[in-house]
Amino acid sequence: MDADSSEWTALWPYGLLLIVLAAWAIHLFLAPSSWPEWVGAALLQVFIVAQMYGFPLTHYFLTTIVPIDIPAVRSSGHVWATLLDYGTFAMVLEMMLGSVLVFAGMLLIVKGWAEVYFHGDRLITEGVYGVVRHPQYAGIFLVVCGTLIHWPTIPTLLLTPLIVWLYERLAKREEADLIGRYGIQYKQYQELVPMFVPGG
C-alpha cells in the first residue's frame, strides 16, 4: 500500500464515526414517522456515506475517464479549487463557505425540531417557523449545498436533485395534511410565510 492510500485509509474509521453520529442526528432531529419520511432520512444517510467515501470514485473518474491530473491527497477533496487550480487559499475559502452553510443548515434543523418538540400538537407560526414554513427541510438543503461547495463527489452531485425533489414533495404532502387539520388558519400562514427561502 503506498503512502497516498494509507493516508486515506487511516481516516476511514473517523468517517465511519461521523456517519454513525449523522445517522443518530438525522433520526433524532428529523424524527421520521411515515414511509416518505423514512425514505428521506435514508436518502440523507446515503448522501452522507457518498460524501464521506465518494472521493475515491470521484478521483478515479476525474483522473482516468476525464484525463485530469489530480494528486490522491486529502486536500484534493476540495474539488472546485483543485480543478480550477486556485491553490490553498481557494481551498480554505471553499471550506469556510461550505462550513458556514452546513452549520446554518444544522442550526435550522435543530431549531425547527425544538419548536415542534416543545410546542406539541399546535400550529407553530413563530420562531424559525415565522421565517420559513419548513425550516428543517430548508436546513437540509443548506447542509447539502454546503457539502457540495466544500467536498463534492460524483455520488453527492447525483443525489442532490433527488433529495431536493423528495423533500419538496414531502413538504407539499405535509401541507395538505396541515390544511386538513387547521383549515383557513394554515392557508393564511401559507400566504404570509414562504416555504423554504426567506423572502421568496
Image: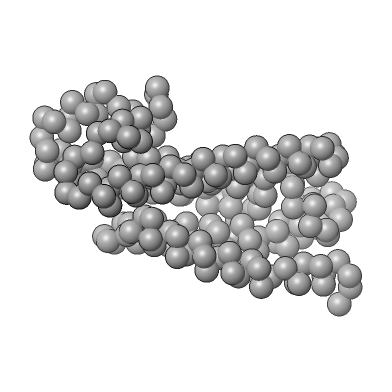
Apparent side of residue 66 relative to residue 152 in the rendered image (left or right): right
Q: Residue at x 69, y 70 (%)?
A: 12
Q: Quadrant of the C terminus?
A: top left
Q: Residue at x 82, y 55 (%)?
A: 63
Q: Quadrant of the N terminus?
A: bottom right
> Is there any visible trace of residue 178 in the rendered image?
yes
Which of these two is toward me, 144 or 159?
144
- Measured as percent of width and height from the top left, residue 105 is found at 49, 43
Q: How was this image coloured?
A: one colour
Where 46 falls versus 196 (above or below)? below
In the figure, residue 199 lies in which quadrant? top left
- Measured as percent of width and height from the top left, residue 147 is found at 60, 47
- Measured as percent of width and height from the top left, residue 55 is found at 70, 58
Q: Residue at x 89, y 73 (%)?
A: 2
In the figure, residue 4 lies in which quadrant? bottom right
Which of these two is toward me, 166 or 67?
166
Apparent side of residue 20 relative to residue 42 in the rendered image (left or right): right
Which of these two is toward me, 29 or 67?
29
Apparent side of residue 184 relative to residue 29 in the rendered image (left or right): left
Apparent side of residue 93 relative to residue 183 in the rendered image (left or right): right
- In this view, which residue lies farthest toward the bottom? 1
> Is there any visible trace of residue 145 in the rendered image?
no
Q: Residue at x 11, y 30 (%)?
A: 184
In the figure, residue 49 lies in which quadrant? bottom right
- Measured as percent of width and height from the top left, residue 17 is found at 59, 69
| Tally of marks | 0
Which of these two is toward me, 79 or 25?
25
- In this view, which residue lies farthest toward the front? 118
